[in-house]
Amino acid sequence: MNQPTLADLERLARQAGQILSDSYEKDHQVNFKGVIDLVTEVDHASEEFLLAEINRQFQGHSFLAEESGASESQTEHLWIIDPLDGTVNYAHGVPFFCVSIAYSYRGRVVLGAVFDPMRNEMFVGERGKGAWLNGRPLMASNASELQKSLLVTGFPYDAWHVIPNNFDLFAKLGKQTQGVRRMGSAALDLCYVGAGRLDGYWELYLKPWDVAAAGLIAEEAGAKVTNIKGAEDYLNAPQSIVAANPQLYDKLLEQLQ
């Protein structure tokens, strides 16, 4: 079975990103998967395009996608896709969203691409080889003190029901840092940690497609990425994630316990 290259993921992410940008700030058909969990016709259009292209170019590969779920056949070649990460932002015309595509081989993510079509920023990573933004090598920040760090987090769609409550951690860390941002796209949050724009990120309730590509990108940029217990597996349930540069990671993890 043929394996994709990083250039394949880049091309697919850019083409799906074009679908998002073409329909940006137009009227959307918004449906609700939950009280505040939106899906638009653009999520579906982007995902249908990606799955069709993957099936055409890489026959027999499996996929796990936000709107379609998992493919019936499971192989050692798995594509993990979020066709529009940041749907609430997108539906409101807030220009902070992306396409996220990861390729996993034999249970390990080896390629990732996250494309922000509003800024024309293509974040990519390849296991063991590095991470790049529009061809420029990425490097996580070197902030070593919480007090001098800028963090980011996110909240689940049923934030008021779940335990632990991330609002408590948000308030706690907001008082110990330069600030905690909440920007609405887990994939871009992680890429920004990899790019050194943000020093650390955590989130408690996620899905694999939110962070599969960006987690690899952040790791390859030098960030330490684990679940909230400090274990390496941040893609399997119960899902949570912590990402920070190595100097800050232990201090952030300690505050999250």
Image: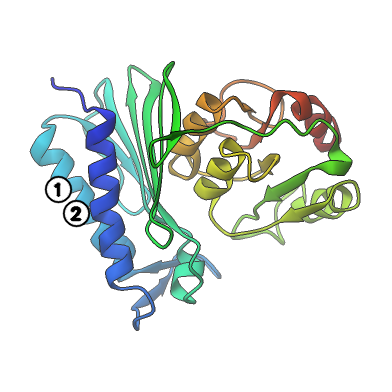
Of residues 196 and 202, the one drawn nearer to the viewer in this rendering: 196
Would you place residue 120 above or below residue 2 in this image? below
- Residue at x 83%, y 29% (from the top left corner): 251
How many numbered marks appear? 2
Residue 126, image x and y in percent? 39, 24
Residue 163, image x and y in percent? 75, 48
Residue 239 visible from this viewpoint: no
Of residues 216 and 82, the one drawn nearer to the viewer in this rendering: 216
Q: Residues within 10 Å of mark 2 (few under 14, many from 20)?
A: some
Left or right: where does residue 44 sit relative to residue 149?
left
Residue 6, image x and y in percent? 29, 30
Q: Which residue is mark 2?
A: 49
Q: CA distance from mark 2 to mark 1?
A: 5 Å
Q: Are marks 2 and 1 in contact (CB under 8 Å)?
A: yes
Of residues 43 and 164, the one drawn nearer to the viewer in this rendering: 43
The label number, if any, that marks residue 121 in the structure image: none
Q: Residue 27 falls in which quadrant of the image?
A: bottom left
Instruction: Find numbered disc 1 in the image and state the secondary structure of the residue it sits on.
Output: helix
- Residue at x 27%, y 20% (from the top left corner): 76
Query: Colour scheme used in the picture?
Result: rainbow
- Residue at x 23%, y 53% (from the top left corner): 15
Query: Quarter of the image containing the N terminus?
Result: top left
- Residue at x 80%, y 37% (from the top left corner): 256
Of residues 135 and 251, the one drawn nearer to the viewer in this rendering: 135
The label number, if any, that marks residue 52 in the structure image: 1
Left or right: where does residue 218 sit relative to residue 22?
right
Residue type at the position of mark 2:
Phe
Residue ranking furthest to the bottom: 27
Q: Residues within 10 Å of mark 1 (few under 14, many from 20)?
A: few
Residue type at the position of mark 1:
Ala
Query: Quarter of the image containing the C terminus?
Result: top right
Instruction: Find numbered disc 2 in the image and state the secondary structure of the residue it sits on.
Output: helix
